[in-house]
Amino acid sequence: MDSARPTNGERFTVFARLMHWIMAVMTLAMIFIGVIMVTSVSHRDLLLAIHRPLGTAILVFVVVRFGYRLFHRPPPHPPTMHPWDRLAATASEYLFYALLFAQPLVGWALLSAAGTPIVLFDGVRLPAIAPHSTTVYAVLRDAHTVLAYLLFLVFVAHLCGVLFHSMILRDGVLDRMAFWRPARAVQEPAPDAARAVPPLERRGG
């Protein structure tokens, strides 16, 4: 019996699930782009042209998602999660929000300090949020790198936690954020009912 799997009332809303998966794809793409930019310079200009507006989109999405999260209570954690496990899950969630907000903001300030405008589309540019300074640029560049490593580590830890609950505990954690229909709990027959003998058979037919 798989009674730990969530019902529709124990799942995130459709909007929350949609935002989650869109941001997951964007974050994963940003991580891969960042790795390729560090290890290869052959497509650096093209990757930068994707990296900058994508970072801006992540910043907008995380603000919208966090605002939505403040006014919409998430579904309860599965009963298989211990109190410390629930605390760790909640803390990692807010850490994820903080990193996804800080990283693109630092990147924006980094480009502002370098004097490089962020062009979104059709000549639309973001205003500078940091002074044009070599010193400020160096500090922000180091901060951007550190935040990138932290974001990667939190992402991996989150993925490992989901895989552990889905493949080992099988408590339906992923179903809370998925778009597929959660598996229904299988009702097992009561032991007494399974052993019951019909009255006619007890009388010999």
Image (cartoon, grey):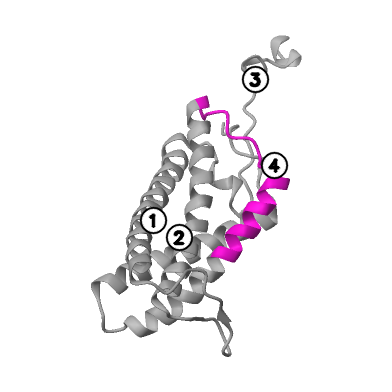
Position of residue 159 relative to residue 142, above or below, is above
Q: Which residues are magenta?
A: 59-83
Q: Dot 1 lies on which element?
A: helix
- Is 137 in front, or is 94? 137
From the image, state whether disc 3 or disc 1 is nearer to you: 1
Badge 1 amino acid: Leu
- Crowding at mark 4 (Cα within 10 Å: few <14, some 14-19, many 20+): few
**Looking at the image, which residue sits at the far top?**
203
- Disc 1 versus disc 4: distance between alpha carbons? 28 Å
| Mark 2, residue position | 103
Q: Dot 3 lies on which element?
A: loop
Sequence-wise, which precedes: disc 4 or disc 2?
4
Image quadrant where one finds the N terminus? top right
Q: Are marks 2 and 1 in contact (CB under 8 Å)?
A: yes
Sequence-wise, which precedes: disc 2 or disc 3?
2
Sequence-wise, which precedes: disc 2 or disc 1?
2
Residue 162 picture location, percent across and down: 46, 44
Residue 32 picture location, percent across and down: 36, 67
- Crowding at mark 2 (Cα within 10 Å: few <14, some 14-19, many 20+): many
Residue 183 picture location, percent across and down: 61, 44
| Mark 1, residue position | 147
* Residue at x 72% of width, y 46% of height: 72
* Residue at x 66% of width, y 40% of height: 75
Sequence-wise, which precedes: disc 3 or disc 1?
1
The image quarter containing residue 30 is bottom left
Sequence-wise, which precedes: disc 1 or disc 4?
4
Asked if the stretch drawn in magenta spans residue 69, the answer is yes
Badge 3 amino acid: Ala
